[in-house]
Image (cartoon, rainbow, N blue to C red):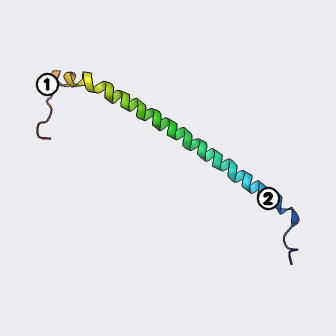
Amino acid sequence: MFDAVPNDSTGYVVAAYMVFLILLLVYLGILGAKFQRISRDIAELTEEVEAGQTPAAPAATETGAKEPSGV
């Protein structure tokens, strides 16, 4: 009844799991690198916004630009 299943098929199952594990690790590595890059970009943008708020306000009024009052 079970003669149709070869006995050496466990090697294929192990190989399939290994390929899946390798692909999963590569995928998680790519996601980790992307999250690090996004986190670094957010930190840089936050620093630029915080640094730009104090000196940029007088510079905008020197050129004659006025802030909208109806907002």
Give the vertical position of 22 relative to 46 (above or below).
Answer: below
- Residue on which disc 1 sits: 64
- The residue lying at 78 percent from left, 55 percent from top is 14
The reply, left or right, for residue 27 in relation to residue 45 is: right
Tell me residue 33's x, y (percent). Answer: 55, 38
Which residue lies most toward the bottom here? Answer: 1
In the depicted structure, whether residue 11 falls above or below residue 49: below
User: Who's the residue at 82% across and 57% down the image?
Assistant: 11
Q: Quadrant of the C terminus?
A: top left
Q: Which residue is mark 2?
A: 12
Instruction: Provide residue 8's location: percent of width, then percent of height.
Output: 87, 62
Q: Which mark is residue 16?
A: none
Q: Position of residue 49 (x, y in %)?
A: 32, 30
Amino acid identity at mark 2: Tyr
Which of labels 1 and 2 is toward the front? Answer: 2
Kindly report the distance in space between the C-alpha atoms of the residues bearing marks 1 and 2: 74 Å
Q: Secondary structure at mark 2?
A: helix
Kind of residue at badge 1: Gly
Q: Position of residue 18 (x, y in %)?
A: 73, 51
Mark 2 neighbour class, 10 Å CA radius: few under 14, some 14 to 19, many 20 or more? few
Residue 64 horizontal side relative to residue 30, left or right:
left
Q: How many numbered circles are shown?
A: 2
Task: Indicate whether 62 appears above or below 8.
Answer: above
Q: Residue at x 29, y 26 (%)?
A: 52
Q: Residues within 10 Å of mark 1 (few under 14, many from 20)?
A: few
Measured along the vertical axis of the image, is residue 22 above or below residue 38?
below
Task: For the residues labelled 1 and 2, say whether their Cβ atoms are less than 8 Å apart.
Answer: no
**If the image is split into quadrants, where does the N terminus sit?**
bottom right
Residue positioned most to the left: 70
Mark 1 or mark 2: which comes first in sequence? 2
Q: Quadrant of residue 68?
A: top left
Q: Is residue 68 left or right of residue 46?
A: left
